[in-house]
Image: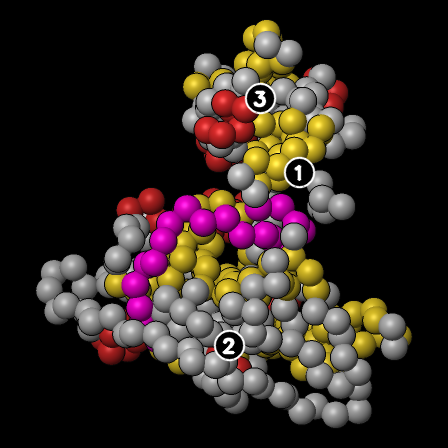
Amino acid sequence: MRNRLPLAAAVVAAAFLGGGTALAIGAAVWDGGTTTVVQQAPARASVAVAEFAEDESGGTIGEIYRDVAPGVVQITSDVVRPSLFGEQRGQSLGSGFVIDKDGHIVTNFHVIEDARQVYVNFSQDDGLEAEVVGTDPSTDLAVLKVDAPERALTPLSLGDSEGVRVGDEVVAIGNPFGLERTVTAGIVSALQRQIASPDNFTIDKVIQTDAPINQGNSGGPLLNAAGEVIGVNTQIATGGAPTGNVGIGFAVPSNTVQEVVGELIEDGRADHAYLGVEMLDISDALADQFNLPANGALVAEVVEGSPADQAGLRGGDTDVIVNGQSYRIGGDVVTEADGQVLASADELRAIIASKEPGDALALQVQRDGESETVNVELGRRPTETG
């Protein structure tokens, strides 16, 4: 679960930590009498820069920057948040990018969270007040709109994140620490990562990169060698340091962006199907020791009042530790969903994510050594996990 950094009276980095290491990369300055930004350089942060081949697959880093940078913007939000000292006012800094000639701009939800006013800068001197079209904390995405002439807008193209492979060369463009349109490069380090969203749900299929990104890069594009957006930069891992890049960044995949942004523009919100369980993978050691199915999703906990609860799914009642890993057993093990045999909890999450609120889901479960079918009507994901 991500935790908010405490608000200092004068200055605070607006970030969310995941296990003490995952940091949302929007920066904030809070006004408690001063407006000084304190930055701490990361210790021994060294990242190799990828070399981009000049062939049919794409251009050089410089060429990508030349073509794409005009569509990358800086976002400044006037934010008001409660604290122990009363109402705290400040500015949140982040990045974003243009997606169409209508003036729609994609950024992170956490960049504009609690904002009273939002401004978009195409350069240091041309701040435009932006309308918040819609937000989705569950994927940490937001859409803004500015009233700007078409000639001032350079839309970026969304690529297919399903086609991304580990080792692919990537470019990140954003405004780290408020430095306008900074470009960095690296590779795709890993795929299918999971990170916590601002409302404490899980963002799936996240892209990990070693392209250097820092506070202020939040909401900026991660681009492939063809100059297409394959992700929205949203978090970094800090290795326990307070801030700074150590070569592990995370981007919300472009296919998720495309789906969610369409809903935000149309409806102002994105609806996600909701089952209401905490589920875990089953290790071989756990299966052997407690005679559980080798594959499937272990239901550790069922949220009271959720669709899973109403359908009669059962959570665990016994906490055990196997090979240093904690589990809660005694509940159902979901082995199939809509006839698809499940190898892991991730596969069940993916099936749920492909559905809409109100859709039916047939689950095959192992319960007390017997196989049963549980039919669930999926709900709408709540705004907060609690």
Q: Residues within 10 Å of mark 3 (few under 14, many from 20)?
A: few
Of residues 202 and 287, the one drawn nearer to the viewer in this rendering: 287
Residue drawn at (76%, 86%) of the image? 10
User: In this figure, which residue is indicated by the disc labeled 3?
Assistant: 290
Q: Nearer the viewer, mark 1 or mark 2?
A: 2
Residue drawn at (75%, 71%) of the image? 6
Magenta span: predominant SS is strand
Q: Nearer the viewer, mark 3 or mark 2?
A: 3
Which tag, 1 or 2, sits closer to the chain's start? 2
Q: Residues within 10 Å of mark 2 (few under 14, many from 20)?
A: many
The type of residue carrying mark 2 is: Gly
Specify whether residue 146 is in view.
no
> Which residues, given as a range, are shown in magenta?
184-202
Which tag, 1 or 3, sits closer to the chain's start? 3
The type of residue carrying mark 3 is: Phe
Residue 317's label in the rendered image is: none
**Tag 3 near tag 2, CB within 8 Å:** no
Residue drawn at (63%, 88%) of the image? 37
Q: Nearer the viewer, mark 1 or mark 3?
A: 3
User: In this figure, which residue is indicated by the disc labeled 2?
Assistant: 244
Tell me residue 14's x, y (percent): 65, 72
Q: CA distance from mark 3 to mark 2?
A: 43 Å
Does the magenta run of residues contain 191?
Answer: yes
Does the magenta run of residues contain 371?
Answer: no
Q: Residues within 10 Å of mark 1 (few under 14, many from 20)?
A: some
User: In this figure, which residue is indicated by the disc labeled 1?
Assistant: 381
Residue furthest to the left in view is 55
Tell me residue 288's x, y (percent): 50, 23
The quarter of the picture where residue 120 lies is bottom right
**Tag 1 near tag 2, CB within 8 Å:** no
The quarter of the picture where residue 333 lies is top right
The type of residue carrying mark 1 is: Arg
